[in-house]
Image (cartoon, helix red, strand yellow):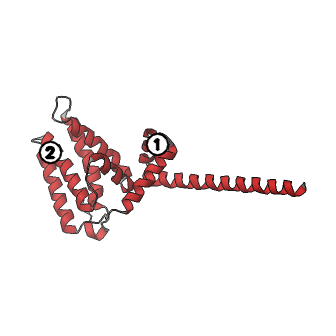
């Protein structure tokens, strides 16, 4: 009988240790995802069926992102994009709706140039969330306002706000991967 109890105690101890290890592993994974995705982590959890499902989604985004060939831009290309952005901002004064569309297209072109797939807004947001989660909400806001632009329900102030939001992601994408000597301290 003593042997039976010893076996039961050992089995229970192994199960407890395994559960504890699993809990520690999940906690570490959750913390890593929270740090990597920032506000996007909470947003995904809120929209998902469960925290576990949301974390699987975020891990899948990381895995997809690892397969992308994201690249830094050569200084000449960065300079061209910076000039193009300045032109869009200048045109905003005369035609805010058109300038906002141009800003959206320019951000998408920059994403493509960096190596991000541009097959649709939702996938763009998912791909950007891995490395650009802190500015992703800017992109979402700008995209939402741009979707309403041209109608009577969008004020010039909202359009200006959308330009500012597009610029936040644009600047991050433009500088990302650049070394300080590459950008010479310029701002887009």
Q: Which residue is drawn at 45% across and 47% down?
A: 41
> Which tag, 1 or 2, sits closer to the chain's start?
1
- On the image, numbered disc 2 is attached to which residue? 99
Residue at the limit of the structure toward the bottom, as seen here: 181
Which callout, 1 or 2, points to the residue nearer the camera? Answer: 1
Query: How far across and down, in percent of the image, does residue 34 sit?
Result: 48, 51
Is residue 177 shown left or right of residue 101? right
**Element at label 1:** helix
Q: Which residue is drawn at 31% across and 49% down?
A: 123
Residue 131, placed above or below residue 53: below
Residue 96 — which label? none
Split into 4 quadrants, where in the image is the C terminus? Answer: bottom left
Q: Can residue 178 be seen in this view?
A: yes
Give the quadrant of residue 78: bottom left
Residue at the limit of the structure toward the right, as seen here: 1
Q: Which residue is at the front of the view, 129 or 184? A: 129
Q: Which residue is drawn at 31% across and 68% down?
A: 179
Query: How far across and down, in percent of the image, does residue 18 sit?
Result: 67, 56
Residue 14, placed above or below residue 165: below
> Are the residues flagged by discs 1 and 2 in contact, CB closer than 8 Å?
no
Q: Which residue is drawn at 36% across and 54% down?
A: 132
Q: Which residue is at the front of the view, 22 or 188? A: 22
Query: How far across and down, in percent of the image, does residue 186 sit?
Result: 24, 62
- On the image, numbered disc 1 is attached to which residue? 45
Give the quadrant of residue 130: bottom left
Q: Is residue 188 visible?
A: no
Split into 4 quadrants, where in the image is the N terminus? Answer: bottom right
């Amino acid at each position: 009988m003593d042997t039976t109890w010893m076996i039961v105690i050992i089995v229970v101890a192994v199960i407890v240790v395994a559960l504890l290890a699993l809990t520690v592993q999940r906690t570490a994974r959750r913390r890593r995802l929270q740090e990597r995705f920032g506000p996007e982590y909470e947003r995904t959890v809120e929209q998902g069926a469960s925290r576990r499902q949301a974390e699987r989604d975020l891990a899948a985004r990381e895995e997809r992102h690892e397969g992308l060939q994201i690249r830094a831009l050569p200084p000449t290309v960065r300079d061209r994009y910076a000039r193009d952005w300045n032109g869009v901002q200048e045109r905003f004064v005369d035609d805010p709706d058109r300038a906002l569309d141009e800003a959206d297209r320019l951000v998408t072109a920059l994403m493509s140039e960096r190596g991000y797939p541009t097959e649709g807004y939702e996938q763009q947001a998912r791909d950007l969330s891995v490395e650009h989660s802190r500015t992703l909400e800017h992109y979402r806001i700008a995209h939402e306002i741009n979707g309403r632009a041209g109608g009577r329900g969008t004020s010039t102030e909202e359009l200006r706000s959308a330009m500012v939001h597009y610029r936040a992601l644009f600047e991050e994408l433009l500088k990302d991967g650049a070394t300080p000597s590459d950008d010479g301290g310029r701002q887009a």
